Image: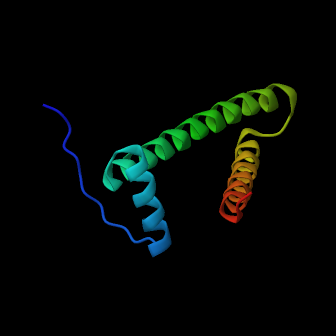
Amino acid sequence: MGTRDERIVFRITAERKEALERLAQEMGVTVSALCAVVVGEWLERKAREQAVQDAMLKGGMEVLRRNTDIPEDVLGELVVKVVRELRESTEARQRSGP
């Protein structure tokens, strides 16, 4: 048996709704279908970004373990802090736009 689609409701400005309607019409799809594609692509991109961050973190931790005398618990706390700051600055840049 296939997965069941779920319905969500969200608010956007009138201008964005009109832009979505125009784009959906140009593409020959419903606004709902267009939103589903956009959200799906965004979720996939975020998952890829997270996988890259996780791989970089794992590799970086291994390099630090091999090349420093920093205790494991301190190293872990340091890396968590750096990752948090990088994530926050990346999100802030994304919110502010290009």
Identify the image quadrant of the C terminus: bottom right
| Residue farthest toward the right in the current orientation of the protein | 68
| Residue farthest toward the top in the current orientation of the protein | 66
**Residue 33 location in percent, x, y?**
33, 48
Q: Is residue 81 above or below residue 55?
A: below
Between 73 and 39, the residue placed more toward the observer is: 39
Between 87 and 81, the residue placed more toward the observer is: 87
At 70% from the left and 33% from the top, the residue drawn is 56
Q: Is residue 41 above or below residue 93?
A: above
Snapshot quadrant of residue 84: bottom right
Horizontal arrangement in the rendering, residue 16 relative to residue 77 (left or right):
left
Q: Is residue 95 above or below residue 81?
A: below
At 44% from the left and 70% from the top, the residue drawn is 12
**Residue 94 location in percent, x, y?**
67, 57
**Residue 87 location in percent, x, y?**
68, 53
Identify the image quadrant of the N terminus: top left
